[in-house]
Image (cartoon, helix red, strand yellow):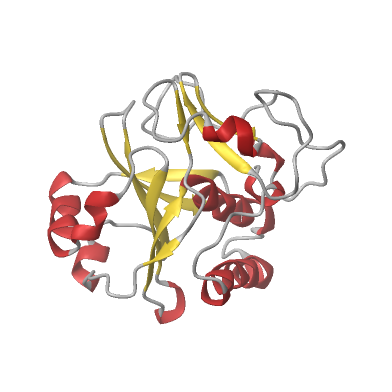
């Protein structure tokens, strides 16, 4: 299996999201459960394997084996939850020093710290997240204490004046990364990539709780 470039900050370790390489590419054959090999529907569950760190496709029966179970595998949540009352000031956002108005923040158990990542033409790129910045956000938004380590992230959209915040499964976050990587053109990205990003977030407006589209979630 070919591999994506590693996420900065996780140097010399396998990319935890290597199985997402199939993003926006027609499958040559039916996707199969990576536990029992049964063919999968277009929409299916994903499981995070912590060592090596990667995302696996799973049928419902296999996925449920890892629900609320500690160990090597962690079931990735199904739903994206909007946070309409989320509080984040412009100063708090600026403190993240991100070059794009999109980001997702998650706690990485292997890295033993909270990571801020943003989509880029090269894939998911990490920005240094001061612990004080995360502590301030968590103090203002207690809902963040319910965020599951490794498999769930705070997804942020501030493009064109938007102020949208979600608790999102990591496969949804990396679906966004894949959209940006595949459609980016030139220095500024081009109209196509920003329309794709707009359509991506429009899905959440139409269906606030959303299961990721399985084939689109595989970069």
Q: Nearer the viewer, residue 179 or 106?
A: 106
Q: In front: 21, or 141?
A: 141
Front position in the image: 173 or 101:
173
Residue 103 seen by the camera: yes
Side (left or right) of 119 relative to 89: right
Outermost residue, right side: 28
Across and down, in percent, residue 151 comes to 42, 41
* Residue 128 coordinates in the image, percent (x, y): 28, 44
Look at 69% across and 46% down and name the residue there.
23
Residue positioned 83% across, 37% down in the render: 30
Instruction: Evaluate whether residue 4 shows in this view.
Output: no
Which residue is drawn at the image coordinates 29% and 57% (left, top)?
97
Q: Is residue 84 left or right of residue 30?
A: left
- The image shows residue 59, relative to residue 11, as above or below, that is below
Residue 156 in the image: state x and y as whole percent.
Answer: 39, 63
**Quadrant in the rendering for residue 110:** top left
Residue 159: name its quadrant: bottom left
């Amino acid at each position: 299996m070919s591999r994506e470039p590693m996420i900065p900050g996780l140097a010399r370790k396998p990319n935890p999201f290597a199985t997402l390489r199939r993003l926006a590419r027609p499958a040559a054959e039916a996707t199969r459960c990576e536990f029992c090999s049964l063919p999968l529907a277009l929409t299916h569950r994903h499981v995070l394997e912590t060592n090596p760190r990667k995302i696996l496709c799973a049928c419902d029966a296999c996925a449920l084996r890892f629900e609320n179970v500690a160990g090597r595998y962690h079931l990735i949540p199904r739903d994206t939850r909007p946070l309409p009352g989320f509080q984040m000031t412009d100063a708090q956002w600026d403190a993240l020093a991100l070059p794009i108005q999109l980001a997702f923040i998650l706690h990485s158990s292997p890295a033993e710290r909270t990571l801020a990542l943003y989509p880029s033409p090269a894939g998911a790129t990490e920005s240094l997240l001061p612990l004080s910045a995360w502590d301030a956000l968590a103090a203002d938004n207690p809902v963040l204490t319910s965020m599951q380590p490794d498999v769930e992230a705070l997804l942020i959209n501030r493009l064109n004046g938007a102020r949208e915040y979600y608790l999102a499964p990591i496969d949804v976050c990396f679906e966004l990364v894949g959209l940006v990587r595949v459609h980016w053109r030139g220095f500024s990205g081009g109209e196509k990539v920003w329309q794709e990003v707009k359509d991506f977030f429009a899905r959440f407006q139409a269906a606030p709780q959303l299961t990721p589209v399985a084939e689109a979630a595989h970069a």
